[in-house]
Amino acid sequence: MPQNKVQELEHAKKILHHPEFYWNSGTDAGYKGSMRRAEWIVSRTGLRAGQQALEIGCGTGFFSQVFLRSGARLHAIDLSADLLQKATERCGAAADFRVCDVEALPYEMESFDAVVGVRVLHHLDLEPAFAEIWRTLKPGGVIAFCEPNMLNPQIMIQKNIPFIKRLMGDTPDETAFFKWPMKRFLKQKGFQDISITPFDFLHPWIPGALVRPAEQIGSWMETVPLVREIAGSLAIFARKPGR
């Protein structure tokens, strides 16, 4: 097994008992931010009953439960059997959870109307991952991901200074994305209707009493040119051309 995948599995064991803490969804602000990402994905993809969706890197099923509310048939994968056990406990048999690698998906060609994920692409080798995403996505199907924005000052420090990276619990190969290179990458892979939007100024460590005013300030900052470019996340959407 490649070293980066070994590191991801070791990381999964480390966070197994406190995943929401490590994924910054355990605080009031962190929970709101996480739910906003999942709900944006449902809205942007138009997930609904009768559709087939694939969630990559589902972890403990925190986001899976939101995707399931759309009524779509959800297939969800992760490298870690331990994390998937928690996902199954959380969601039951409502989703098809499988231990597998995104670089070798066990699905037929053109299986899915949507391929989605939250904070997962920055763990992956994009070339082989997107070869499989493209293969299993139906013509006219869509992708939607929320990923860390490398232009955000905290994220830039966290992802590029090894000591800080270890302190924050990141794996060595974790990174973040700049908007324009990601847009070029998706265009080169054949996607169209590409939209990559910086958003999210609600820091997960903001005290509960300050969450509401912080949300209001953050919403305003997302409308300000240049300022919005340093938001914490990128909302990534694209469509595979139809036949």
Image (cartoon, rainbow, N blue to C red):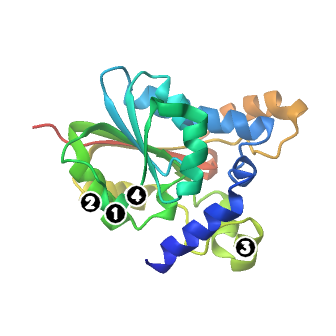
56 vs 204, nearest the viewer: 56
Choose the circle earlier in sequence order: 2 or 4.
Answer: 4
The residue beneath circle 1 is 103
Q: CA distance from mark 4 to mark 1?
A: 9 Å
Q: Earlier in the sequence, mark 3 or mark 2?
A: 2
Q: Is residue 57 above or below residue 72?
A: below
For marks 2 and 1 on the same chain, the one whose residue lies earlier in the sequence: 1
Residue 202 as seen in the image, left or right of residue 106: right
Percent coordinates x, y for residue 29 in the rendering: 77, 37
Q: Residue at x 75, y 78 (%)?
A: 163
Judged from the image, the secondary structure of the residue bearing numbered disc 4 is loop
Q: Residue at x 30, y 22 (%)?
A: 50
**What residue is disc 3 on?**
166
Considering only vertical position in the picture, is 96 above or below 71? below
Residue under pointer 4? 100
How crowded pointer 2 is (Cα within 10 Å; few <14, some 14-19, many 20+) is rated as some
Crowdedness near tag 3: few (<14), some (14–19) or many (≥20) residues, C-alpha within 10 Å: few
Q: CA distance from mark 2 to mark 4?
A: 15 Å
**Quadrant containing the N terminus in the rendered view:** bottom left
Residue 131's disc number: 2
Nearer the camera: disc 4 or disc 1: 4
Q: Residue 119 or 219: which is nearer the viewer?
A: 119
